[in-house]
Amino acid sequence: MTESSRNGGEPQNPHDPQPPLYFGPQGQSPVPATPPPPPYEPGTHRRRPRRPIALFAAAAVAAGVIGGGVGAVIGNATDHSGGSSTATGGGSAVVNAAALDGTVAGVVKAVDPSVVEINATSGQGKATGSGVIITADGQVVTNNHVVAGASQISVTYANGKTATASVVGTDSAKDLALIKIQGASGLPAATLGDSSSVAIGDQVVAIGSPEGLSNTVTSGIVSALNRDVTVPVENGDSQGQGFGGNGSGRGDQWPFSFGGNQYNGDTGSSTTTYKAIQTDASLNPGNSGGALINMAGQIVGINSAMYSDSSSGSSSSSSGSVGLGFAIPVNTVKADLANLRAGGTNQ
């Protein structure tokens, strides 16, 4: 009797599909396997496990926080740079930022086109200084003592071309001035940084025209902060003193004091004192008004004075850098720009 007959069924056709067999422990006969249950009940929607959803949600929240944090950092950095530039009229970023590679050469490639030589003429003589382009249409920041009392002003670009300029505003108390290059457009405006972030030991680069040598570059570090620098006040009536007293056009040669010590020279009562960034980057006559730059290619100061030891017997017109240079912090410049653009209040 066949197996199907014993079970009361019809004889099984050997060619019919056979059910899968489950082989049990050794020695037992194979038996048909029990079909696995369906993945979900027919006619219903499958519900995903709750725990993976919770994990995914937690991961999404974490990613959102991390992404938001990175976005906030980038946004703040962009806003900081852009905000300063918008407020001051400079570009939103370093013009040739691709050149920045952590080297002095990279800083020079990026910023040198934004620094000009300034030549000012008055009845007292000629002065040579430097300036920093801060707007594409030709606004240039420099020192008041470079242009005080000048009847004619010309600028020389890094490429050697020249143009005429005129004074927009001066602030003798801060030794700052703003001039405007006539007919200018599309100039490479420098990016003004944040001098409050400058630290002692930071590497800096100075660009200017010492002794009339255009596009001269020196480098060093920030050697001190908040130095009290006392210089003569130039109001345009005594430009000879402002230009070194000899018509040589070197207004930044004056012996001056810092840390509360008084001027070596005879300046009378017409002096002003400001807080300065001290640097050992070599500054010489003609660097006045030029750029002090950090390694990110941002202007952090306007070079304004150098220490000259008149007690050594050398005249102020012949003494050179002794590694004590001073720059007006760029935050002071930015705070004074509106005043300068309006013509200045200390003229």
Image (tube, helix red, strand yellow):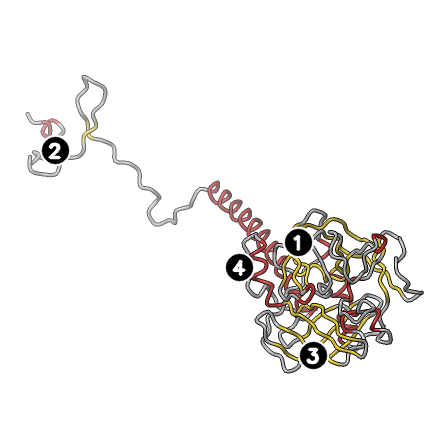
Quadrant location, the N terminus: top left
Of labels 4 and 2, earlier in sequence is 2
Reading the image, the residue beneath label 3 is: 165
Q: Amino acid at mark 2?
A: Gly
Say whether disc 3 or disc 1 marks the residue closer to the N-terminus: 3
Distance of mark 4 from mark 2, alpha carbons?
91 Å
Contact flag, marks 1 and 2 (Cβ < 8 Å)? no
Q: Which residue is mark 1?
A: 204
Residue nearest the viewer, comparing 112 with 90: 112
Could you say which quadrant of the image residue 165 lies in?
A: bottom right
Secondary structure of the residue carrying numbered label 1: strand
Q: Which residue is the site of mark 4?
A: 99
Lower sequence index among marks 1 and 2: 2
Where residue 18 sits: x, y (%)?
13, 35
Q: CA distance from mark 2 to mark 3?
A: 114 Å
From the viewer's side, name the closer residue of 155 and 337.
Answer: 155
Q: Amino acid at mark 4?
A: Ala
Question: In the rendered image, which quarter is residue 111 located in?
Answer: bottom right
Judging by the rendered image, the residue that carries numbered circle 2 is 9
Residue 67's x, y, as percent?
Answer: 55, 52
Distance in Å between CA atoms under marks 3 and 1: 29 Å
Q: CA distance from mark 1 to mark 2?
A: 100 Å
Q: Residues within 10 Å of mark 2 (few under 14, many from 20)?
A: few
Nearest to N terminus: mark 2 or mark 3: 2
Say which of 227 and 76 sits in front.
Answer: 227
Determine whether 225 is above or below 79 in the image.
above
Q: Earlier in the sequence, mark 4 or mark 1?
A: 4
Task: Tell me the quadrant of the picture where the C terminus can be found.
Answer: bottom right
Report how far apart the C-alphas of labels 4 and 1 lie in the structure.
16 Å
Q: What amino acid does circle 1 point to?
A: Val
Tell me the amino acid under the disc marked 3.
Answer: Ala
